[in-house]
Image (cartoon, rainbow, N blue to C red):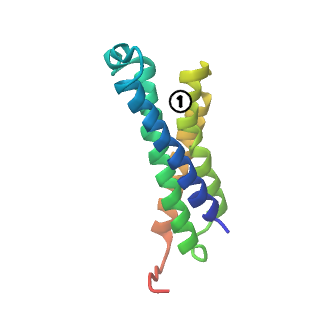
Amino acid sequence: MEGKKNIATGFLIMGLFMAYGFLLIYLRDFAPGKEEWINSYGAGKHFESRLAHVHGNLFAFLNILIGYLLLQFKDKLQHAKIISWLALAGLLMPIGILSEVYFGLPPALVLIGAIAMTVSVVWLGMAFFKMKNINLNK
């Protein structure tokens, strides 16, 4: 059942990145050395951490939306399984950003995830564009 795993994973990842947002609030407002964190607002680890937080939630939401659409139109969409897996692979982007920030890993996951999510969104858009009849009243 294509789409179900996107919805479930999307909500779980969204919850994790929302919790990560609380860590960012702590670092900004309560942590020792918060002034240094605030001063690096637009650069370095601070910027990359916020980038991961925003993209993590965005890509999680996209997985929820893509999953819902795949479930609703499973009989009319071609390549649903590929689109589903590409959207899930897109989650590697924000995870890759965090792996860069905390472990110093190269940005390979960021690029793979960004490309996968972009391809899944474009592919799904093209699939809907090619669809003949959409009946929303099942």
Q: Quadrant of residue 70?
A: bottom right
Q: Which of 74 and 29 is in front in this view?
A: 29
Q: Is residue 21 visible to us here? A: yes
* Mark 1: secondary structure: helix
- 68 horizontally vs 39: left or right: right
Q: Which of 74 and 48 is in front in this view?
A: 48
Q: Nearer the viewer, residue 19 or 100?
A: 19
Report x, y in % for residue 71.
Answer: 57, 71
Residue ID at (60%, 53%):
9
Report x, y in % for residue 20.
Answer: 49, 37
Residue ID at (43%, 37%):
21
User: Up-down: is 109 above or below 38?
Assistant: below
Q: Is residue 79 visible to us here? A: no
- Residue found farthest to the bottom: 138
The amino acid type found where label 1 is placed reads: Ile
- 106 horizontally vs 69: left or right: right
- 90 horizontally vs 27: left or right: right
Which residue has dot 1 on it?
A: 97
Q: Nearer the viewer, residue 115 or 17?
A: 17
Q: How many marks?
A: 1
Report x, y in % for residue 49.
Answer: 46, 28
User: Up-down: is 19 above or below 48?
Assistant: below
Q: In which quarter of the image is residue 102?
A: top right
